[in-house]
Amino acid sequence: MDRRSIWLAVLSAVVFVPSLFGNVSAQNSATVLSGIELTRVVPPGFYFQGLSAPTQIRNSAAARFGNKRYVIVGMVDTSGYAADVRAKYEGFFITDSSIRINGSELKNGAYGFGFSDSGKMHILNLAGDEVHSTSTIKDNELKRPRPLQMIKSGDAVRLYSGRDYVTITPR
């Protein structure tokens, strides 16, 4: 190769390679949905352990990673459930791709979830069996805690229950 060809190859690599990483980052960048975007993806109700409960839209949140990957979370009215189910089940957790919660993998699927007073988030399959559990982090700096909310944090989102949160990242 002559000198000009080498410089052309180096220049092409310098321009082309960073664009590849930009696409990867764009595929994983998080957007917390609100308004009409949120209402389009949140289901009006959810099935869990043989019952269907209506979604509390005001206590629902969703994030989009890239263009087509979603995590949708919502609290439901659990008044029709037995006391032992209400103690561990607050709502639904839906992900259409594998994600990480505080670094641990969760496969795509529809789940129930609950935050416990002992500082844990529990993910349950639709039969009510625990499939994932992780410790939460307390955010004493959060200005206005709500029963359920998502806040963007870099390429991740934080899922809050009051001041307690877990970090959700794409896989």
Image (cartoon, rainbow, N blue to C red):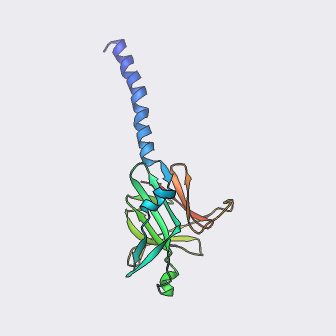
* Residue 36 or residue 108, whichever sits in front: 36
Image-based side of 108 in relation to 85, left or right: left
The part of the image, by quadrant, that contains residue 116 is bottom right
Res 104 seen here: no
Res 35 seen here: yes
Which residue ends up furthest to the front in the rendered image? 36
Q: Position of residue 108 (x, y in %)?
A: 37, 62
Labels in figure, total: 0
* Residue 108 or residue 77, whichever sits in front: 77
User: For the N terminus, which image quadrant?
Assistant: top left
Q: Position of residue 55 (x, y in %)?
A: 47, 72
Image-based side of 98 in relation to 84, left or right: left
The part of the image, by quadrant, that contains residue 120 is bottom right
Which residue ends up furthest to the bottom in the rendered image? 82
Residue at 40% across / 54% down in the picture?
69
Residue at 51% across / 81% down in the picture?
86
* Residue 41 or residue 106, whichever sits in front: 41
Q: Position of residue 6 (x, y in %)?
A: 36, 17
Residue at 51% across / 60% down in the picture?
102
Q: Position of residue 48 (x, y in %)?
A: 40, 77
Which residue ends up furthest to the left in the rendered image? 1
User: For the C terminus, which image quadrant?
Assistant: bottom left
Residue at 43% across / 70% down in the picture?
44
